[in-house]
Image (cartoon, grey):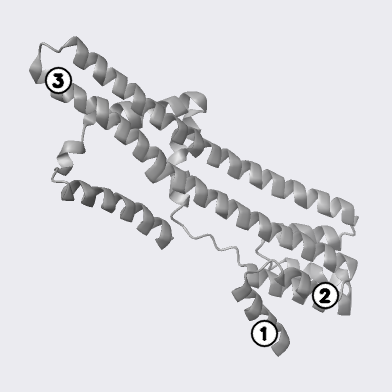
Amino acid sequence: MDLGSLIGVVGALGMMILGVAVGGSGISTYADLPSFLIVVLGSWFCFMAASSIGEAIGIFKVMGLTFSVPNFGEKGIVTKLIAFSEKARREGLLALEEELEDLDDEFMNKGLRLVVDGTDPGIVRSLLEIEVNQMQDRHASKIGGLSMWAALAPGFGMLGTVIGLIAMMKNLEDKASVGPNMAVALITTLYGSMIANWLLTPMISKLRTNDSKESQVREMIIEGVLSIQGGDNPRILGMKLVAYLSPEDRKEVEQELQDK
């Protein structure tokens, strides 16, 4: 569980509720079913029209991804690649084949298997980069879905405002209807802004950050695999790979390498 995302979303909502309470208004004042139907469900159905039923339903799973902490295991990857490099230098590239049976990282496994099979380095890089590009395209599609919903919600908020104002203007003689219609007119704008700014925009930012981190890890693997194929000294390989790590992880890995 990503506590930062959870605390941020809950905290932002809590501050809005606290602001309402301090201002003297009840929470029920801002609970309006017509506004919810127009903004939340209306914009979601419009997103479905622009994409597909599967993508519209799957968007909630995408939103859930922002509350999980992805573990790309960068330090473990660096350690494994250096170990593979040392073995390849001692026993040759074919000796890595037995290691691949227990290697869980499919991307690294694919790259090293290509190396063991004697594939040209240019082809190895090309095939692995295609994998990275396809992964980025999948991520971009999910992020694009959230971006579209974030763009639609404020528009439906304004649409609800217009609907409420029209209803109010047509029934000015009915004083009892002025309040409810004005509430719809204003609360729909509030709901549209909340959906876009409180919920979806932070989620989009988090998913983009995770995509960038995963892409960087895969680039690191590509460099490691090609260095092993090129017969680089394991120490040189280690210097290449630790450059991808955060300063804290870099110190830890460097210390482990020195202790060997």
Whichever of callouts 2 and 3 sits on the residue coming sooner in the sequence is 3
Give the residue type that dot 1 points to: Gln
| Residue type for callout 3 | Val
Disc 1 crowd, CA 10 A, few/some/many (<14, 14-19, 20+): few
Q: Position of residue 11 (x, y in %)?
A: 32, 56
- Which quadrant holds residue 188? top left
Q: Evaluate whether residue 216 shows in this view.
A: yes
Mark 2, residue position: 236
Marks 2 and 3 sit apart, C-alpha to C-alpha, by: 75 Å
Q: Which mark is residue 178?
A: 3
Point out the residue furthest to the front here. 23
Instruction: Return the residue at label 1.
Output: 255
Looking at the image, is 218 positioned above or below residue 97?
above
What is the secondary structure assignment of the residue under circle 1?
A: helix
Q: Which marked residue is nearer to the observer: mark 2 or mark 3?
A: 3
**In the displayed structure image, the side of residue 20 where residue 38 appears, left or right:** right
Q: Residue at x 87, y 72 (%)?
A: 232
Q: Is residue 237 above or below residue 4?
A: below
Look at the numbered disc 2 and give the secondary structure of its residue: helix
**Foreground pick, 131 / 35:** 35
Tell me what residue is drawn at x 67 percent, y 84 percent.
256
Residue 258 image position (x, y, % from top left): 72, 87
Q: Quadrant of the N terminus?
A: bottom left
Is any atom of residue 260 visible in this view? no
Q: Residue at x 84, y 66 (%)?
A: 227
Mark 3 neighbour density, 10 Å: few (under 14) some (14–19) many (20 or more): some
